[in-house]
Image (cartoon, grey):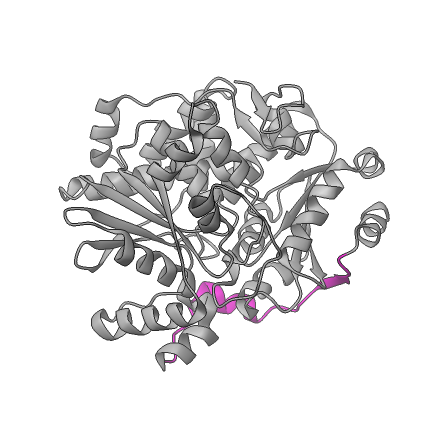
Amino acid sequence: MKYYSTNKKAPLASLEEAVVKGLAGDRGLYMPERIDMIDEEVIADMKNHSFQEIACVVARAFFEEDIEPEVLDEIVRDTLSFETPVVHVEDNIYSLELFHGPTLAFKDVGARFMARLLGYFIRKEGLRQVNVLVATSGDTGSAVANGFLGVEGIHVYVLYPKGKVSPIQECQFTTLGRNITALEIDGTFDDCQALVKAAFMDKALNEHMTLTSANSINVARFLPQAFYYFNAYAQLDREGKADELVVCVPSGNFGNLTAGVFAYWMGLPVKRFVAANNRNDVFCEYLRTGVYTPRPSVQTLANAMDVGDPSNFARIYDLFDGFTKPFELICQLISAHRFTDEDIVRTMRRVYEATGYVLDPHGACGFQGLVEALTPGEIGVFLETAHPAKFKSVVDDVLGIDLEIPPTLRAFLDGQKQSVELGPDFEGFKAYLLSR
């Protein structure tokens, strides 16, 4: 399988090249040259299989031309040591709880899969040390840092906006040491993401070190998230609830929603998707106007969604670009809703008071997106992307409770913070990397 750039100006790349480079030479995002369908009978039979077995089937559809089947299955099974349960919340709305991995966030799957895949390529090809640059607005940094921790031949640099991630999120990637370095950027997530993208384009840096990214701009990070959608469908299909399925995705950089659209193109019978945005609503605006206008992000309670220029918009558009009316087709498959902090607070309180279910701020956007989008007869699943304890101060304040912190999170709080403070300017960031 070859991979092309969304900007269409870079040479085709192999899977290994796409994973190791992260970003194409023309600053575009890599896309597989085709999306293979999974047989209807195979999808219908997924209800009889485990999450790991389902994921192996999906992974083969993506990668079997490039990796030996037994090696690929081993990578998938090593990645998935946990389940992602579907939990009934209210009426015809279900939560897909994606926070049962090591850092209690949905990005654990993509990060762990990429770490193992990249480690495989390093061993196979004898590559020199690969340096992973990852910008985070919250959960990506912790998932990547823990997914890559101790992996031989890889060093990870986590760029995060100073004062704009939750304390627990920060502890998950600043206390690890070893092959993980946290860079505390005095700016926004968009500044962090811009630094990462600029680094890939800088000749001197790329001659000095091998760079790649573990953000969802990397195909090995976002594609495995398609596993979730097939697993959710299988769980609901067991209960006879999979017809007229609508999936709502809390969306920041849009990697998770893009993975869902890939699953749709692979044959997963999802009726449509809903993108739940906070005040950073450039995608909502695009669906309303047909014009994509990125702008600086603003800080909200749902901080992992504080993205003003979502990278994966390029992939979503590219999936439809070959059709006569791509904008109309995108609007048919995806709708979007915007929620303020006040909306988030009201939803968290209403659901807790009515059902006892604790939503984190991002899950609250997903739930409310379904409340506003579902029509009679439809079943809705929203992605609850992180354990609410990762946002304990917000949850406790909104709900008036003392939410228990799971032991896996509490362990991070006992660690010693280690970070390097940098400004948002590229020359300072470049100088730091050249000194390494």
Q: Is residue 136 left or right of residue 396?
A: right
Q: Is residue 105 visible?
A: yes
In the rendered view, would you say 195 is above or below 352? above
Who's the residue at 47% across and 50% down the image?
285
Q: Quadrant of residue 120?
A: top right
Of 305 and 412, the residue lying toward us: 305
Task: Locate residue 178 relative to residue 343 in the image: left or right.
Answer: right
Residue 270 screen position, x and y as percent = 28, 37
Residue range (magenta): 401-424
Residue drawn at 53 percent across, 40 percent down: 312
Residue beneath the point at 34% across and 40% down: 229
Give the number of marks.
0
Q: Mark yes or no: residue 176 visible.
A: no
Whether the magenta-drawn stretch holds residue 52 is answered as no
Closer-to-camera residue (265/60): 265
Residue 141, x across and y down, in percent: 58, 54
